[in-house]
Amino acid sequence: MHVQVNGEQRTVAAGSTVAGLLKELDIRPDRVAVELNLSILDRSEFDGRNLQEGDRIEIISFIGGGQGA
Amino acid sequence: MADDRLTIAGREFKSRLWVGTGKYKDFAETKKAIEASGADVVTVAVRRVNITDRSKENLLDYIDPKKYTILPNTAGCYTVEDAVRYARLARAAGVSDLVKLEVIGDEQTLFPDTAGLIEAAKILIKEGFIVLPYTNDDPIVARKLVDIGCPAVMPLAAPIGSGLGIRNPYNLKIILETVKVPIIVDAGVGTASDAALAMEYGADAVLMNTAIAGAKDPIMMAEAMKYAVDAGRLAYRAGRIPRKLYATASSPIEGML
């Protein structure tokens, strides 16, 4: 099925979870926040949350930055 | 300076110099500059993880969140909605309720949209955030931010990255006199004397990024800023002499031939 991850189309297996997606992308779950269809997930939800066709997922983290844009 | 700690919302900070982590050539340089600055608060931005190139290193591999207070910002947000969304994501990704709130007004000046800032701060404070707002050097806005519950206010010295130093010292002095929470001068510092001056006026801390990261030798400049902030703070506490038009001899007249 198709989902959108950080603005890019991606195919994931049916029944995939948020935790599974992070693992597939080699992303440590303790350093990111995940927004699923505009609502922020608690880390404890990563394991149990199944992805659905057309889901929009944002995975964010901290980068170097000071002020402004 | 162990007896002169900065306290904000019950949290105690060792350093009165806070630094950003942008614009360095790599994470190794970022880490060295932060160490040289002596800062214990470092700001970070919130962005999408690069999912196509996972070889990219993580900033937090270099800046230990146990050693430093990580202060996420909402840099790059031009609307209340975006700033609130980024702040919530930052809290979910991090470990604390601290956020340096920025609602930027336009790309050319990067001046804060103070109306949007107050609105976003109200929403986030209601949600339990500790909001440190990046604001203009406007005493009235600073007071309003305190009234709605900001435990510190961060007025700019000059536009972000401009290096112009304190453009409106009289406004800054009014803010320092009238606002009874810690004032952190944020943005616009160019060199060490700018930071020292802010501290001599009575600012509680200075936050900078470009002045260090953009210097020819960022690590040396980080060290210079550490001394400048410490010197300015000590001079403020020591109390400077008044300015006078004419000379006053510092050697005694008694005993002259």
Image (cartoon, rainbow, N blue to C red):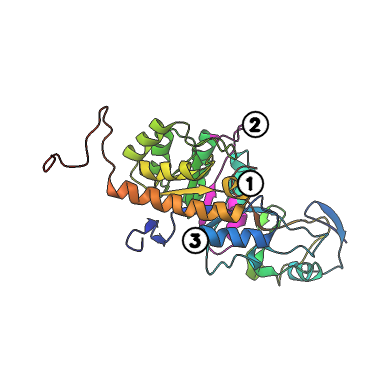
Q: Secondary structure at mark 2?
A: loop
Q: Which residue is mark 3?
A: B40
Specify the quadrant of the image occupied by residue B222: bottom right
**Discs 2 and 1 carry the same chain letter:** yes
Which structural element holds mark 1?
Answer: loop
* Drawn side of residue B23 relative to residue B134, left or right: right
Judge depth for marks 2 and 1 and give the one in front.
Answer: 1
Rendered view: A27 above or below B23: below
Q: Residue at x 22, y 41 (%)?
A: B250
Q: CA distance from mark 2 to mark 3?
A: 31 Å
Q: Residue at x 70, y 54 (%)?
A: B25
Q: Earlier in the sequence, mark 3 or mark 1?
A: 3
Q: Are marks 2 and 3 on the same chain?
A: yes
Residue B251 falls inside the magenta stretch: no
What residue sits 29% from the left and 42% below the top? B240
What is the CA distance from the residue labelled 2 to the residue labelled 1? Answer: 19 Å
Three-letter amino acid code at disc 1? Gly
Query: Mark 2 packing: few (<14 Cα in 10 Å), some, or many (20+)?
Result: few
